[in-house]
Image (cartoon, rainbow, N blue to C red):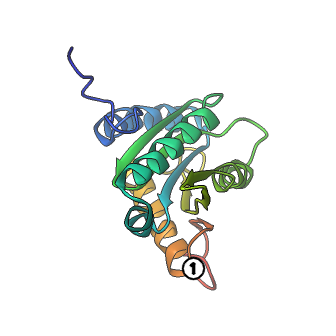
């Protein structure tokens, strides 16, 4: 049986190769139609410790459960959910008319942080750092720029203690904006 070159074998969601190819088309379409997109980088916090304390199979379960949760959450949206590498996931989603990127990200965060796994009769609560960027209703036309902004926001979440969301602010030159 031939494996799909676009599916991550562990998590059974799209891989980075698929994301790179499809995201470009999605951003181009959003630019033409002045649609709002949100790009989210999602990192499973303390993944090495999860593996070290509970074993690699448990770590695999954490990744597969995260992937399934992301895929289920974004099912109603026009979106691409992919494993970006290691314990990082990437999502590019069209923001529905009347919804905000803030609400979309906050609801995702609540959904993800509700995830827990059981090992040896102990519950392990998963934590996530999320970086969010937008295409500013079609003004940002390069996927790489969206990824760079979300990545900067993700690393700010990590620097500020993890287990939180940081939004990239296009308009802030001072204060807590990045």
Q: Residue at x 76, y 43 (%)?
A: 99
Please determine whether, in this image, residue 130 is positioned above or below residue 32. Answer: below
Q: Quadrant of residue 174?
A: bottom right
Q: Residue at x 58, y 59 (%)?
A: 126
Left-right relation of 155 to 16: right
Relative depth, front residue between 39 and 52: 52
Relative depth, front residue between 104 and 135: 104
Please determine whether, in this image, residue 66 is positioned above or below residue 23. Answer: below
Relative depth, front residue between 110 and 125: 125
Residue 90 visible (yes or no): no
Q: Quadrant of residue 22?
A: top left
Residue occupying the far left of the picture: 2
User: Which residue has dot 1 on it?
Assistant: 161
Residue occupying the far top of the picture: 1
Q: Residue at x 60, y 76 (%)?
A: 177
Instruction: Provide residue 52's location: percent of width, then percent of height.
Output: 37, 67
Q: How many marks?
A: 1
Q: Residue at x 57, y 79 (%)?
A: 161
Residue occupying the far bottom of the picture: 175
- Are there few (<14), some (14-19), or many (20+) residues within 10 Å of tag 1? few
């Amino acid at each position: 049986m031939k494996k799909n070159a676009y599916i991550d074998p562990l998590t059974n969601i799209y891989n980075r190769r698929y994301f790179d190819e499809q995201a470009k088309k999605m951003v181009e379409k959003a630019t033409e139609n002045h649609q709002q997109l949100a790009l989210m980088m999602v990192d499973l916090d303390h993944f090495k410790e999860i593996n070290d304390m509970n074993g690699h199979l448990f770590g695999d379960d954490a990744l597969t459960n995260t992937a399934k949760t992301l895929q289920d959450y974004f099912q109603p949206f026009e979106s691409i959910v992919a494993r970006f590498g290691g314990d990082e996931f990437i999502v590019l989603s069209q923001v529905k008319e009347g919804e905000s990127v803030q609400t979309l990200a906050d609801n995702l965060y609540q959904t993800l942080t509700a995830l827990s796994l059981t090992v040896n009769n102990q519950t392990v609560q998963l934590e996530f750092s999320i970086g969010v960027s937008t295409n500013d209703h079609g003004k940002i036309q390069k996927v790489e720029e969206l990824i760079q902004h979300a990545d900067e926001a993700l690393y700010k979440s990590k620097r500020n203690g993890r287990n939180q969301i940081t939004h990239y602010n296009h308009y802030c030159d001072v204060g807590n904006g990045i």
